[in-house]
Amino acid sequence: MKRTIALVVSVVMMLAVLSACASKQNGKTDFTVKTVTMTYVKSPLNVPSIVEKQQKSFETAFSKLGLGFAYSDLTSGADQTAALASGDIQILNAVGGTSVILSAANGADIKIIGMYSTSPKAFRLFSKDASVASPKDLKGKTIAGPKGTNLHELLTSYLATGGMTLDDVKFVSMDIPSAFAALENGSADCALLAGAVAYNCAAAGYHLVTDGDGLIAGTILTATTQKFYDGNKAVVDAFLKVQSDTLEYIRSNHDAALQMAAGETGLEPAAVEEMFGLYDFRQDITDSDIAALQKTAKFMFDSGLIEKEAEVSSLVLKK
């Protein structure tokens, strides 16, 4: 009986080895998913994502791994991180640093793959009143914008330069298009805006109170879960390769890339060119990026958005 069991075990082990060799020879790898689902966020002006969609870059890259690909239409940071946690989405391609920190603070498995962009000047505070020239001029005013975002951090940081806090204004949380509408119809004195909406607001003649330069980093990231990476390393590696190739394409084909962005956003090419200069699209995350995100984590803790200040360095993907 013992000899029989030993023979069976030997056969099973040999078959496993042969299967692994065949898999390696065929260039195939086992994955935990059959289709990779990723976010697609074109706003404020996410040129890399627009180029990748136009060129079907991820479809091509993942098909080589024997996988399907799909875009998610979720654009809210909270919805995106919830879908990542549930496994409905595997990679977040352009998610705000605040959303990542909030998700981690709530106990979710979320890890930073790398940078997507920084764009402090792209985040702006507008007013109907051209006399608003300092934080103290905002006292008692109604300010509309999205809570728990780079724009929220911008407002808090700007008020702090005048020794003020959110308690000194009436902050009303709403998305960017709604905030602009509130500014237009007079239900808000000021609006926190970014991207094409901010450009259109400026073009309409509204007063720019401040942008994020010197106040926030305006950090946008790419993210996944440690669990997904551990079981699908080749997928994340392929994602990073596409991202790197796309950034190189944009550098080498500037006009073509911005033409794609103009077509996707509905903006005039001249407007896209002007806005593009506000963004630093890059992949590698630096020590200064970690420090900026740690500052954001402190802002979120001090504002009561999270109960415990996150250690940002621990959120970087372990490869």
Image (cartoon, grey):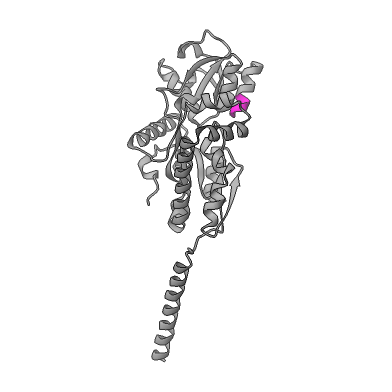
Q: Position of residue 171 (x, y in %)?
A: 54, 22
Q: Quick check: can you spot residue 187?
A: no
Q: How many marks?
A: 0
Q: Residue furthest right?
A: 185
Quarter where residue 49 is shown: top right
Left-right relation of 72 to 117: right
Question: Can you say whether 67 is above or below 296 in the image?
Answer: below
Q: Position of residue 206 (x, y in %)?
A: 58, 14
Write the start and end of the magenta stretch as one range: 174-179
Q: Residue furthest top?
A: 131
Question: Can you say whether 182 is above or below 9 in the image?
Answer: above
Quarter where residue 10 is shown: bottom left
Q: Position of residue 224 (x, y in %)?
A: 47, 48
State the residue in front, 83 or 107: 83
Left-right relation of 148 to 299: right
State the residue in front, 298 or 277: 277
Q: Residue furthest left?
A: 287
Q: Residue at x 47, y 64 (%)?
A: 27
Q: Quick check: can you spot residue 118?
A: yes
Q: Position of residue 97 (x, y in %)?
A: 45, 36
Task: Identify the main secondary structure in magenta.
Answer: helix
Q: Residue at x 33, y 37 (%)?
A: 287
Quarter containing the N terminus: bottom left
Q: Residue at x 42, y 40 (%)?
A: 283
Q: Is 175 contained in the magenta span?
A: yes
Q: Is 264 contained in the magenta span?
A: no
Quarter where residue 40 is shown: top right
Question: Can you say whether 251 is above or below 200 in the image?
Answer: below
Q: Residue at x 39, y 39 (%)?
A: 310
